[in-house]
Amino acid sequence: MKNYTIISGTGRAGTTLLVRILMKAGIDTGFDPDAAIDPVAHAGLEMDLRNKPDCRLVKSPWIAAYIDEVIADNDIKIDHAIICMRNLNDAAESRRRVQRAQNTDQHVAGGLWGISDPAEQEAYLAEMFHRLLFTLSENGVPMTFLHFPRFANDVDYFVENIQPIFPDVSIEDLRSAYHSTVAPELINDFSKTRPPATAMYSKSAAAEAAARAHREKLEAELATLTKLVSDQHAELALLAAQTSQITLLSQALDRRDLQNSTLSRDVAAAWARIAELDHLVADLQAGKQASETALRTLQSELQAGTQALGAANQQLHALFASHSWRLTRPLRVVRRAVARLRRSLTAILSLPETATDVFGNKLSGGQAAERTGASGIGGLPGLQNLAASDVQRIAATFDRAFYLATYPDIASSGFDPLQHYMSFGWKEGRNPTPSFSTSFYLETSPDVRAADINPFVHWVLFGSQEHRPTMPALAAGERQADAGRVAQPSATEGPETSGRSSVTGAIRKAASRARRALGEFYEKIIVDHEPPVAIKTVEDFKKTDVSYEQRIINENWTFDTKPRDENTGNEIAPDNMFVYKYLLLERKLSAYKGMDYWDFIRHVVNSRDYTRILSVGSGPCAVEMEIAEKFTKPYVIDCLDLNEKQIQDATRRAQQRGMNLRPVVADLNEIVFEEKYDLVIICAALHHFVELEAVLERLHGALNDTGMFVTYEPVMRNGMYLFRATRVFLGLLFLLLPARLRINHQDYPGEKRVDRYYNEYDRSGWTFESIRSGEIPGLLPKYFKTIHFGRGMTFLRRVSDSIYGCNYRMERRRDRLIVNVLCGLDRFMRATRLLRPEGLFYIGSRRDRPKPI
């Protein structure tokens, strides 16, 4: 239950003055002590008690009309009623004066109440006053009566009656608040101007004669006036004819203006189409140049490989044609035979009594020796059924000392390091040599991972020949120290075989790498990326995997789960100074007469006496509060959003900070605006709407005759895809950036994956993110008369936002240098119009209004 002290009475009896005095004395009335009141009626500071306001004292002159509802509400208790009383005729005359001053028949503050005939005001006030006092007395509510204007002229009378009601307020505070508030010159005494009610006049003969003379004089003057009126009628008839001609001329001018407007729109559409074609041509030229560059690179690599192959063939031909080679051939044959014989005998001597293959078949001594190897380790997991030479290569490449030094638990256990790695270590992610990472090899070789093959065994036998990378720090194509050792020709191989295979393999690998790189560049960069479904209306979502209703749920969930500052509502993001630098640069370059979005709105509000603002998609109202804290003139901002909890919490925080923000919970696709606004603003929310045409038409209708529409929006391609020329530019740029600056912090939760190219996909597939953002620049001029079209940055958002921007550390000189170079490149691309902007600061007015000064 809430307890209140109320102020009421006949009305026009000093209730507003009483509230202002008590506010300055420190009593909570729900208003700021400097709150504005009506300049004509000197009225205001009223609340409806049925809304249960969070304050102690409530002023309500109209409470008599709904006092029964208040008494019946169990959540409301009136502790005391202060009744301000005034002469009934004076109270009624005060309302008639205010109504005449406003020169309107509509209801105004302090004007006529409850009647249409001014002469009936006293009767209505008496009826309402009786209803109020009767109901309060019937329910035992304590009442204190204050005479007006006496309490406005006698401070002792005022303090004597008010102080007992508020014992926690000192007499000194009451007197101080009284003297600083009361203005006697504002009190009207209508009794001095009201004629006596019982005036009596006698009629004599002389008076009757004088009356007749006066009547005759009036009749003569009436005849003169009649003639004048007749003359004026003739002049009015002439004026009407002239007005008709002017009307016809005005209609003709309106038709001409309509034709001019249609032609202007056609011309604008034509220029827009020309610009679109120019961009398309530029994209195609850029793609062609990139393809030609890649082709020239491949041709150069192929020519270098061909030359190397020719030189190697010449050397081989000279070697094979030499006398020494032909003379030593028998010796080489004998050496290979002796080596094979020695390995076979050693294997036979070390065989168990019986040996089987992987199918359980018994093997002969020679077969078992060949499969297990002479070293005695051929039976380890991953080495069964391998030739002895392969087993020896694996054992020779394995670094026992490194394994024991890196994993002390293996050294202390007495396990043979190679036996442990082959049985358990590779499954635990342990590394066999300093230059081989088991986990990295499995991650970069999905075919090995899918086949559940020991990665080290695969690399020694196959991966080293294919030049697969073994460590994150080793770029594709780099040779490793171990690879050189393993890839040397064995003792059984002749120079003919080893020389030819190494040169031919190098050429094939270089060509294979070039083909893969070119194919990847073509697929990621040259091939255009289109949204899977063209979204224009809500019905189009039926063609997608995620429905319109589910996307609303996803959007609210995504928005609600972001951490935010409790006071401002701003999103708490990881440390990213690069994005701040980008935002400041874009706001500066897209500004209107040196004013960005925020400064322009402040300029408009502070140059008017009063401004009504509609903010669309306000969310946490962070932008609205940032702008409003520098307003110096009266205003109101209606903050519209579909998320009821968030908009209610945000406007409540703003009101606690003294900002006049009001929540409006509605769907912009359905709401009808009954009021008109001086400003309609929308910051980074328009790109979430699907039916843009209907939304823009509705926002245009919300503007008054001189109103303006202001927006600051990302306008990248639909679905947040890249424009084709921007994709080519970013593709080349990513090939130059260090890997640490290409770590993706957003798209792979729980990972820190390095992107070779910008990770481009349809970001509108789960929510409404940038669902039709690319169409915004073309639609705005169709619905508003353009005042300013501020182009933003081109590609800088892509490398500075939450995906990659956190990689840059401004305390590093190298990173600061890279950031400055990227900013300079973007400014160049923007100035030369080589790339299309992905940001827009737009100001427009109603289509039928001239450009404001």
Image: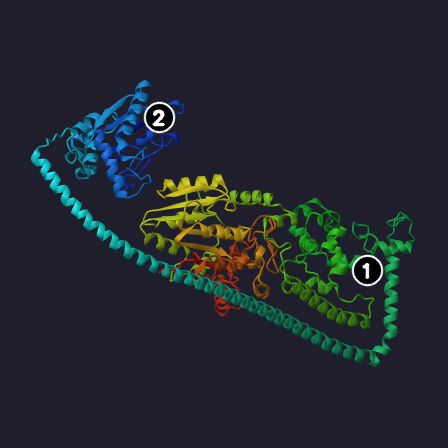
Front-most of residues 483 and 527: 527
Reading the chain from its start, which is encountered first: label 1 or label 2? 2
Closer to the camera, 337 or 236? 236
110 vs 354: above or below: above
Taking depth in this image into account, of 388 and 105 the one nearest to the observer is 105
Q: Is residue 40 visible?
A: no
The residue identified by callout 2 is 67
Whole-percent x and y of residue 756?
A: 62, 60
Image height check: is 302 above or below 179? Answer: below
Residue 563, numbered circle: none
Q: Tell me the SS state at disc 1.
A: helix
Horizontally, residue 477 falls left or right of residue 25, namely right
What residue sits right under mark 1 in the picture?
A: 389
Quarter holding the C terminus?
bottom left
Rendered residue at 30%/43% (across/down) = 104
Q: Which residue type does callout 1 highlight?
A: Ser
Identify the residue shown where x is 21% and y is 32%.
90
Identify which amino acid the numbered label 2 is placed on: Ile
Crowding at label 2, few (<14), some or many (≥20) Cα neighbours within 10 Å?
some
Q: Nearer the viewer, residue 714 or 447?
A: 714
